């Protein structure tokens, strides 16, 4: 199947928003190279808000160039299809590796787990530090760090993918205040509350990934979405040493710092998190090189033989179907993008016209974007969007939740972390008072018996 300059070879994944294909095209030198085409379904490209978010994603992600970030090449429109072109990695993802390791009753060795997370931390830090051409910080937040978005290559590369719900300070906050974006099991507390998030939210999510691959279970192992959200809001989870009594103390302290309820007490940058892990590796004399990583990975994930020659950003040819090409955008629209960092309604309208979109009066507004995730794991819910005002309703919609207290269905009846902490402290005082009275009574009885014995009463 041909799609513009790209020959679609086979479908490799299918999600709620897009179908993902392995594709082939020629580079600037005329040599065949392989890449991925993420073809967005037509029902979504007819929604102006969704189209605007896709344009924003491509606008910033094409500028993300780092060895630990999956390269996004372009956003194109051809033959009634809108699609993203991106780098192809041929050795699956962390989610599949974890499933294979679990199927053998194992967990990832500590040096291997730290190596993977450290590489992702480097890419994440580069994304967090991204600036505009004039040097203004974008404050990019990924908001969807999870094992499915950590990809591997047979050359040993480890890359963070899917900035589809990422956000910068220059983007309009089109997410309603009562709406959560991200995978529930990997959310920071502020993300689970639907509050403003910054880079420290991504650090929390990466800490959950490290926790899970080391211990073989997630921080919130609950089947019901409502239960996951409630525990995520207060960062309520078992300490690593509670699960593995011999878990290294220094490594546990690093994980707990990354997973602190108070974001001010977490690592403030992904680089700081990575350095802490490096120091822990050095102190314990652990070792993991790229060769060690490849040897370990090849024992669980089959590599293609021979590997396909992959396209890289530096060798891709200009594509006439690109929506992002300058000649497709008028001067006034370019100025609008430069000034605001977002796709205005006028820009969306112009891009739809120039790219051949046909407006439909029945275009639908999306309240909850279906997940673009491909696989699911036990206990992991993959919806990207959920109304926090009604977590039970979401649980019913996903058919993974059991009915719980109706009082959870309204935000005004959901306790904040401070209220929960105050209530728990009061309960502790009550229990302590009762225990003190019981002990005092027992002491008085024993004292009376002692006196009776000594005085012969």
Image (tube, rainbow, N blue to C red):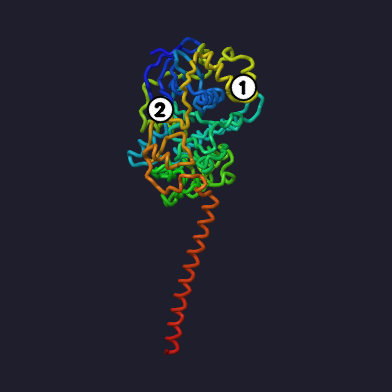
Residue drawn at 50 percent across, 39 percent down: 205
Q: What's the CA distance linking mark 2 and mark 1?
A: 30 Å
Residue 340 sits above or below residue 104 on the image = above
N-term-proximal mark, 2 vs 1: 2
Residue 96 disc label: none
Estimate the x, y position of residue 416 in percent, counting from the top left: 53, 48
Front-most of residues 125 and 250: 125
Estimate the x, y position of residue 224 in percent, counting from the top left: 39, 43
Judging by the rendered image, the residue that carries numbered circle 1 is: 337
Residue 15 disc label: 2
- Relative placement, left or right, of 40 versus 302 is right
How crowded is the residue under tag 2: few (<14 C-alpha within 10 Å), some, or many (20+)? some
Quadrant assignment, res 173: top right
Quadrant placement of the N terminus: top left
Extreme-right residue of the structure: 134
Estimate the x, y position of residue 271 in percent, counting from the top left: 57, 37
Q: Is residue 254 visible?
A: no
């Amino acid at each position: 199947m041909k799609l513009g300059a790209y020959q679609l070879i086979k479908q490799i994944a299918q999600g709620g928003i897009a179908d993902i294909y392995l594709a082939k095209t020629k580079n600037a030198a005329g040599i065949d190279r392989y890449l991925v085409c993420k073809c967005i379904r037509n029902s979504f490209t007819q929604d102006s808000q969704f189209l605007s978010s896709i344009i924003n994603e491509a606008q910033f992600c094409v500028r993300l160039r780092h060895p630990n970030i999956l390269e996004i090449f372009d956003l194109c429109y051809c033959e009634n299809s809108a699609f993203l072109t991106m780098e192809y990695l041929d050795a699956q993802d962390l989610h599949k590796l974890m499933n294979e390791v679990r199927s053998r009753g194992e967990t990832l060795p500590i040096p291997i787990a730290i190596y993977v997370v450290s590489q992702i931390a480097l890419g994440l830090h580069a994304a967090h530090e991204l600036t505009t051409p004039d040097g203004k910080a974008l404050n990019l937040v990924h908001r969807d760090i999870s094992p499915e978005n950590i990809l591997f290559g047979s050359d040993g590369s480890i890359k963070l993918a899917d900035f589809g719900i990422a956000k910068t300070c220059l983007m309009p906050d089109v997410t309603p205040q009562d709406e959560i974006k991200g995978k529930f099991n990997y959310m920071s507390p502020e993300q689970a509350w639907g509050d403003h998030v910054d880079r420290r939210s991504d650090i929390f999510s990466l800490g959950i990934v490290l926790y899970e691959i080391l211990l073989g279970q997630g921080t919130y192992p609950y089947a019901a979405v409502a239960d996951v959200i409630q525990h995520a809001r207060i960062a309520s989870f078992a300490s690593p040493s509670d699960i593995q009594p011999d878990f290294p103390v220094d490594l546990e302290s690093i994980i707990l710092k990354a997973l602190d309820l108070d974001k001010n007490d977490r690592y403030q940058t992904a680089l700081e998190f990575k350095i802490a892990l490096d120091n822990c590796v050095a102190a314990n004399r652990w070792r993991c090189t790229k060769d060690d990583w490849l040897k370990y990975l090849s024992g669980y994930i089959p590599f293609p033989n021979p590997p396909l020659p992959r396209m890289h950003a530096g060798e891709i040819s200009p594509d006439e179907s690109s929506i992002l090409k300058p000649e497709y955008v008028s001067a006034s629209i370019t100025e609008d993008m430069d000034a605001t960092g977002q796709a205005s309604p006028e820009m969306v309208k112009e891009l739809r016209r120039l790219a051949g979109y046909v407006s439909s009066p029945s275009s639908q507004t999306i309240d909850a974007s279906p997940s673009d995730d491909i696989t699911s794991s036990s206990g992991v819910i993959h919806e990207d969007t959920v109304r926090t005002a009604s977590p039970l309703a979401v649980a019913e919609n996903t058919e993974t939740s059991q009915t719980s207290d109706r009082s959870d269905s309204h935000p005004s009846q959901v306790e904040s972390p401070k209220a929960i902490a105050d209530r728990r402290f009061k309960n502790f005082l009550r229990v302590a008072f009762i225990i003190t009275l019981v002990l005092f009574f027992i002491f008085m009885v024993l004292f009376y018996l002692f006196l009776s014995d000594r005085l012969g009463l």
